[in-house]
Image (spheres, rainbow, N blue to C red):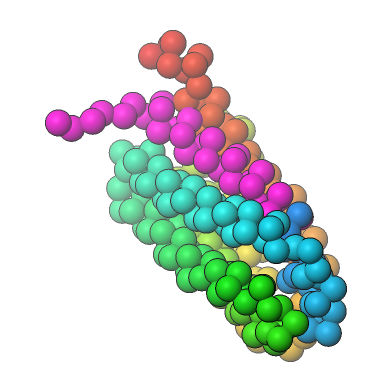
């Protein structure tokens, strides 16, 4: 039996996934990984002190983000296939490719969890795995940036709010592409990354989040009652 899911429900599910993802990402990075990703190998022992139980919650956070990303990939295709099927397929596929890359990166974090019990003896291995996650994830963000550029074209319509969201998505996409491509070619780029991304920080935050909130409103109870 084929299950029918209304466009409004798909819109709400996709929007809710985006908003929830932003919350989980903020908590995961802020509470667990921010210090681990910015420390050097000599300071890593201090950063790891007492973090073992929190670290597993951090991995769970990344896995939830991955699941939500996959759901959004499907949602993009379902929401925009009537408008432009080929672009909807491409946009959804780009996010799916990013999700696969993110999954590969998360595996590096899982490797770290097996080393934490004897972290004093495995500091270099832990540091290398964390750096591998960071490098793989940031490479994936180039693909994510491309996804946002194509998504912006699908989102853009006559409504002013959608034009603003689309502009934010374009700026965010350019920011992800430029910053993470520069990381591949410029030595010691991490020293200036924050200054570069500061230019794009508002679009990076409010592009997808704004789209997610709009989708939730579009697919919420009031929209369903009108239908």
Residue 76: give x, y in percent of width and height: 41, 45
In the figure, 210 relative to 3: above or below?
below
Q: Is residue 19 left or right of residue 79?
A: right
Question: Quadrant location of residue 138?
Answer: bottom right
Tell me if residue 87 can be seen. Answer: no
Please name the residue shown 71% across and 78% down the image: 119
Please name the residue shown 70% across and 57% down the image: 54
In the figure, 153 relative to 6: above or below?
below
82 vs 141, nearest the viewer? 141
Please name the residue shown 85% across and 73% down the image: 46
Residue 118: give x, y in percent of width and height: 68, 78
Could you tell me which quadrant the N terminus lies in? top left
Question: Residue lying farthest front?
Answer: 117
Residues drawn in magenta:
1-30
Q: Is residue 130 left or right of residue 218?
A: right
Tell me if residue 154 can be seen. Answer: yes
Magenta-span inclusion, residue 21:
yes
Question: Residue lying farthest left?
Answer: 1
């Amino acid at each position: 039996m084929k299950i029918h899911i209304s466009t409004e429900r798909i819109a709400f599910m996709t929007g809710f996934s985006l908003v929830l993802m932003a919350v989980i990402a903020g908590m995961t990075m802020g509470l667990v990984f921010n210090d681990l990703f910015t420390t050097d190998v000599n300071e890593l022992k201090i950063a790891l002190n007492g973090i073992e139980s929190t670290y597993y919650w951090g991995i769970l956070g990344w896995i939830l983000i991955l699941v939500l990303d996959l759901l959004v990939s499907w949602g993009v295709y379902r929401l925009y296939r009537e408008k432009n099927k080929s672009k909807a397929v491409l946009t959804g596929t780009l996010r799916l490719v990013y999700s696969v890359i993110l999954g590969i990166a998360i595996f590096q974090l899982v490797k770290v969890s097996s080393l934490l019990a004897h972290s004093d003896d495995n500091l270099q291995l832990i540091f290398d795995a964390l750096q591998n996650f960071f490098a793989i994830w940031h490479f994936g963000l180039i693909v994510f940036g491309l996804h946002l550029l194509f998504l912006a074209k699908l989102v853009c319509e006559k409504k002013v709010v959608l034009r603003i969201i689309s502009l934010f998505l374009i700026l965010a996409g350019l920011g992800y592409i430029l910053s993470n491509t520069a990381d591949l070619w410029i030595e010691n780029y991490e020293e200036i990354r924050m200054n570069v991304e500061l230019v794009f920080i508002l679009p990076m935050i409010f592009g997808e989040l704004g789209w997610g909130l709009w989708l939730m409103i579009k697919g919420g109870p009031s929209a369903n009652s009108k239908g």
